Image (tube, grey):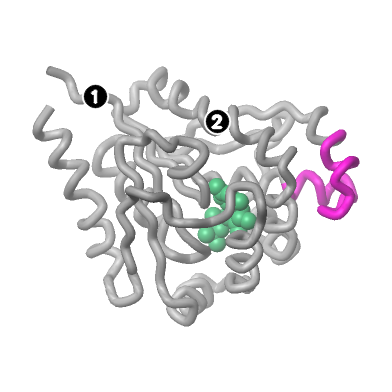
C-alpha cells in the first residue's frame, strides 16, 4: 500500500530550532517545507513598504484586501508571493521586520488572510508530488492543522535561543517577540494539548531531528 500523505506541524518560540528540524524532515521524507513565519514576515514587509503601522488596523485590513497571495515552490521549499512579488530574504529577516512582525501578526484580519492560504499548502504539496507537508510556526498544531498526523512543540531556554540567533549573525529581540506572541488574543503561542513537547536546550539539533523523525519513519514503515 502506498504511504499516506502526512502533515507534520512544528510549533515553538523564536530560535527554538523549528526551521532546522523542518528542513531535515523535508529532506528525509520528501515533504514540502512551509515556514509560516516567512508569511507573517512577508506581509509585514509589504505593510511597511506601504507606510502602514500595526496600530492602524483598519488601514491594514483595507490594504490586505488588495493583496493576492501566491506560492512558488523551489526545491522542497514553498515561498510566498505577495501580489506576484517574492520578498527578498534580506528584507524578510531585517531589523525593521524583526521589530514589527509580532505586532502585525496580532491583527486578526492579517491572520485570517493567511489561514486559508496556509491550509491550501497541503493541496499544493500533494499536486506537486510530495509525500507530505511539514509546516512550522506558532499556531500550526492549534489552528491551521489541529488534525495533523504529527504535532511537535519545540522550546529551549531564552539564553540558549539568543545564543543561536546571535550565532546566525542576527539582531533579534526574541524574548520580546515571544512575550507578544504568547500574550496575544488570536492564536497565541502555546503547546497544543496532545502535541509532543521537546525541550531542545540540552539537545543537539541532530538529536532533536532524530526524536521528531523516529515516529514519522515508524508510521511510513508500517504503511
Ligand atoms: O524564526 P523565528 O522563530 O524567530 O520567527 P518566525 O518563525 O520567522 O516568525 C516571525 C513572527 O511571525 C513570530 O514572532 C510571530 O509573531 C509570527 N508568527 C505567527 O504569529 N504565527 C505563525 N504561525 C508563525 C509566525
Residue 153 visible? The answer is yes
Residue 175, relative to residue 222: is it above or below? below
Residue at left offset 45%, top offset 21% = 123
| Residue 34, percent from left and from top | 47, 40
Q: Give left or right: position of 192 versus 221.
A: right
Residue 71, relative to residue 39: is it above or below? above
Residue 149, relative to residue 158: is it above or below? above
Is label 2 in contact with label 1 (beta carbons under 8 Å)?
no
Q: Is mark 2 within 8 Å of ligand 1?
A: no
Tell me if residue 190 is in the magenta stretch. no
- Of residue 112 and residue 91, the one placed in the foreground of this image is 112
Q: Please identify the quadrant where the C terminus is shown.
A: top left
The overriding secondary structure of the stretch rendered in magenta is helix
Residue 90 visible? The answer is no
Tell me the number on the disc at residue 72: 2
Element at label 2: strand
Residue at left offset 70%, top offset 51% = 106
Residue topped by disc 1: 4
Extent of the magenta region: 44-62
Going from N to C along the chain, the mark reached first, 2 or 1, is 1
Tell me the number on the disc at residue 67: none
| Residue 8, percent from left and from top | 35, 40
Q: Give left or right: position of 148 versus 163.
A: left
Tell me if residue 52 is in the magenta stretch. yes
| Residue 127, percent from left and from top | 41, 18
| Residue 209, percent from left and from top | 27, 57
**Which numbered disc, 2 or 1, marks the residue closer to the eye?**
1
Q: Please identify the quadrant where the N terminus is shown.
A: top left
Write down the quadrant of residue 211 in the picture: bottom left
Query: Alpha-carbon neighbours of circle 2 within 10 Å: few (<14), some, or many (≥20)?
Result: few
Element at label 1: loop
Write down the quadrant of residue 43 in the picture: top right
Amino acid at each position: 500500500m502506498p504511504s499516506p500523505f502526512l502533515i507534520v506541524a512544528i510549533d515553538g518560540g523564536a530560535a527554538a530550532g523549528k526551521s532546522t528540524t523542518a528542513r531535515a524532515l523535508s529532506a528525509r521524507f520528501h515533504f514540502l517545507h512551509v515556514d509560516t513565519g516567512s508569511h507573517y514576515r512577508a506581509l509585514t514587509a509589504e505593510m511597511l513598504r506601504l507606510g502602514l503601522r500595526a496600530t492602524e488596523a483598519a488601514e491594514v485590513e483595507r490594504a490586505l484586501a488588495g493583496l493576492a497571495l501566491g506560492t512558488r515552490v523551489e526545491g522542497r521549499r514553498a515561498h510566498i508571493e505577495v501580489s506576484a512579488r517574492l520578498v527578498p530574504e534580506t528584507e524578510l529577516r531585517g531589523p525593521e521586520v524583526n521589530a514589527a512582525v509580532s505586532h502585525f501578526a496580532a491583527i486578526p484580519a492579517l491572520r485570517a488572510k493567511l489561514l486559508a492560504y496556509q491550509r491550501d499548502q497541503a493541496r499544493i504539496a500533494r499536486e506537486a508530488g510530495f509525500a507530505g507537508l511539514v509546516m512550522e510556526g506558532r499556531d500550526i498544531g492549534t489552528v491551521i492543522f489541529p488534525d495533523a498526523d504529527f504535532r511537535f512543540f519545540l522550546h529551549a531556554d531564552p539564553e540558549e535561543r539568543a545564543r543561536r540567533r546571535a550565532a546566525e549573525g542576527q539582531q533579534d529581540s526574541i524574548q520580546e517577540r515571544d512575550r507578544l506572541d504568547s500574550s496575544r488574543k488570536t492564536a497565541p503561542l502555546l503547546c497544543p494539548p496532545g502535541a509532543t513537547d521537546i525541550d531542545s536546550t540540552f539537545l543537539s539539533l541532530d538529536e532533536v531531528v532524530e526524536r521528531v523523525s523516529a515516529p514519522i519513519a515508524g508510521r511510513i514503515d508500517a504503511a
